[in-house]
Image (tube, grey):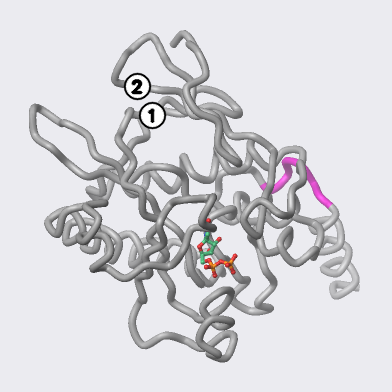
Amino acid sequence: MKKGKKLYEGKAKIIYASSDKNLVIQYFKDDATAFNNQKKSTIEGKGVLNNRISEYILSNLSQIGIKNHLVKRLNMREQLIKLVEIIPIEFVVRNVATGSLTKRLGIEDGTILKEPLIEYCLKDDDLGDPLIAEDHIYAFDWASKKEIEKVKKMILRINDFMIGMFRGVGIKLIDFKLEFGRIKINGKNEVILADEISPDTCRLWDSVTEKKLDKDRFRKDLGDLIPAYTEVAKRLGILHEQSNVTAVNVTKLSSIKKKNK
Ligand code: UDP
C-alpha cells in the first residue's frame, strides 16, 4: 500500500493518504502529551507498542462483532484503516473513579462504580476537551440520538469484553476513552469504532499491586513507561516473554530467583 500525503497530524498519531481513497494510513508517533498539551515529551518505542496493543484489541473486538476502522497492521508503526468522519466527541468509560472524575466531584480515588459510567467530552483542544452533557450533543448536532444510542450499546459491549480480557491477564480496566466515526458500508450509513485503544487511552492497574501500567506513568512522572506498556503487551501475549527484557522484568526475575533460593 503506497503512502500518500500527510492529511492530519495529531498529538500521538499522523494520518496519511493511501492509494485507495477509502483507506488511510495511521502512523503511531513516540510523542506523549498530557494536560491539554502543557506537558510534552518523546518516549522512544511508545508508538510501536501502542500500534501492536491497539491492533490486538481492535481485531479481538472485530471478532465479537464490534465494527471498527482497522483493516490491518502494515508495519511496526503503521496501520491501514478505513477513512471515517470522526464524531467530535470523546467517550470516556469509567469502571473505577480516578483522574479528573475524582477532582471534579470530590469522589474518593479508587471508588468502584456500581455501573460503567459514560462521560462525553467535546473534541476541541483549544477549549481543553470540555465535559458536556448528552443534550449538548443534540443541541449542537454533533451526533444524532440514533447514533448515540448505537454508540452506547457498543461501548457497553466493548467495556465488558475489555474488562474480561484484561482480568484474564491480571489487569484491572479502570477507565478508557473511545472515539467513533461515520462511514458508508454498502450504501448504508454506519457508526464504527475508530482511533486507538492502548495504554495511552486506558487506565490499567495491576490486579494485585495496583501498579499503574498506563499513561499515568507519564502524567504523574512515575517513570518506566516503556516497561509498563511492554508488560501489558507481554501479558496479552502480543510480545514473547523473552523479547525486550526490560528493567521491570530483570527486577522481577531477580526477585523470583531470590524467593527460590
Ligand atoms: N483520556 C484519553 N484522552 C483524553 C482524555 C482522557 O485517552 O484526551 C483517557 C485517559 O487516559 C483515561 C480516561 O480517558 O483513561 C479518563 O481520563 P480523565 O478524564 O480522568 O483524564 P485526566 O484528566 O485525569 O487526564
Residue 59 location in percent, x, y? 37, 41
Of residues 115 and 90, the one drawn nearer to the viewer in this rendering: 90
Above or below, 69 relative to 100:
above
User: What residue is disc 2 on?
Assistant: 23
Identify the disc placed on residue 81.
Answer: 1
Q: In the rendered structure, are the residues bearing label 1 and label 2 in contact, judged by CB atoms less than 8 Å apart?
A: yes
Q: In this view, does 171 lie to the left or right of 161?
A: right
17 vs 164: above or below: above
Q: Is 169 on the left or on the right of 48, as rendered?
A: left
* Among the 4 quarters of the image, the one containing residue 243: top right
Residue situated furthest left in the rendering: 187
Name the kind of residue labelled 2 in the image: Leu
On the rendering, which quadrant does ligand 1 occupy? bottom right
**Which residue shows up at 38% across the image and 60% down it?**
91
Q: Tell me residue 79's x, y (percent).
A: 47, 28
Quarter holding residue 135: bottom left
Looking at the rendering, which quadrant does residue 131 occupy?
bottom left
Q: Does the magenta stretch include residue 243?
A: yes
Instruction: Name the element at disc 1.
Output: strand
